[in-house]
Amino acid sequence: METEKRTWAFDQAAGALPQRLRRLALTLPPGERAWAEELRLRAGQPLSVVFPTGERSLGGPPVEPRELEQLLELATRASVHTALPQLRRGFLTIEGGHRIGLCGTAVMREGEMVQLRGLSSASIRIARQVKGAADGLLPRLCRGGRLTDTLILAPPGLGKTTLLRDLIRQVSDGIDCQPLRVALADERGEVAALYQGLPQLDVGERTDVLDGCPKARGLMLLLRAMNPQVLAVDEITAPEDVAALCAAAGCGVTVLATAHGENRADLSRRAVYAPLWERSLFRRLVTIRRGQTGREYVVEELN
């Protein structure tokens, strides 16, 4: 059943391709389609697929520039103008939560990109949700049956966003804990993947999502506007993100966040995160490691 779901997600993402490339992508056996992570289009090069083991060309005639334009037309349903706010960020989220990243010639105005012309390459990242990724973990992050402030820490590629998404879903739906209202600052659209106002990935029935807004500003907006019990954010990286989290914690809201890092010592060495430790903002630290049987979650009680 899981393989069928993964294959279906690939087929849905491939549906955004122009017809010739779609047919080529669907020649992959179902078992390989189930593990594909991205479809890569580069003008002058054959279509390729990214797997956990690396990138592989599918052969055939090279991708033509007009096919990249066709991809954009299909992804926006022939309404490129309405998709310009997303295009300025360099990517589009399409139905199913799949994400199309684009490269080309940027048109700049007053230091901001206002348009992307002469497309040269594209990446379709295949969205797959792992429900149950947080199973058994949530009770370890609670005190008296309620979620405590938690930071998820791991190097890139170990599933921080996947774990955050499932924790949000379980907290919002009240699985193994008291159900809580969650407000998600989803700047890059990677957690909920909003499409026409609807989350394409399940983040729970009591979750409000703000997409596309810078994290620090989004956290404050959500705090003022949505009366959350939990504020969630993926990948805190800047001083303003840290300041916003500290301000939110001072308002009595539980914080759920992720950051890049190998371990607590690694994070403690970076000045940008110093206020988190000085304020003792987080009560639990979850470190993701790659174990012999898969990913392992190490939970540390901070105070």
Image: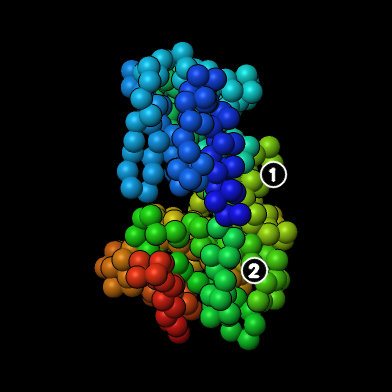
Residue pointed to by mark 2: 171
Residue pointed to by mark 1: 198
Give the residue at x 59% y 36%.
12
- 221 lies left or right of 234: right
- 81 lies left or right of 105: right
Looking at the rendered structure, the secondary structure element under dot 2 is: helix
Residue 39 appears in the rendering? yes
Say which quarter of the image contains residue 219: bottom right
Q: Nearer the viewer, residue 273 or 60?
A: 60
Determine whether label 2 and label 1 are within 8 Å by CB: no
Residue 102 appears in the rendering? no
- 204 lies left or right of 72: right
Numbered label attached to residue 257: none
Residue 144 x %, y %: 63, 86
Give the residue at x 64% y 23%.
77
Residue 292 x %, y %: 35, 70
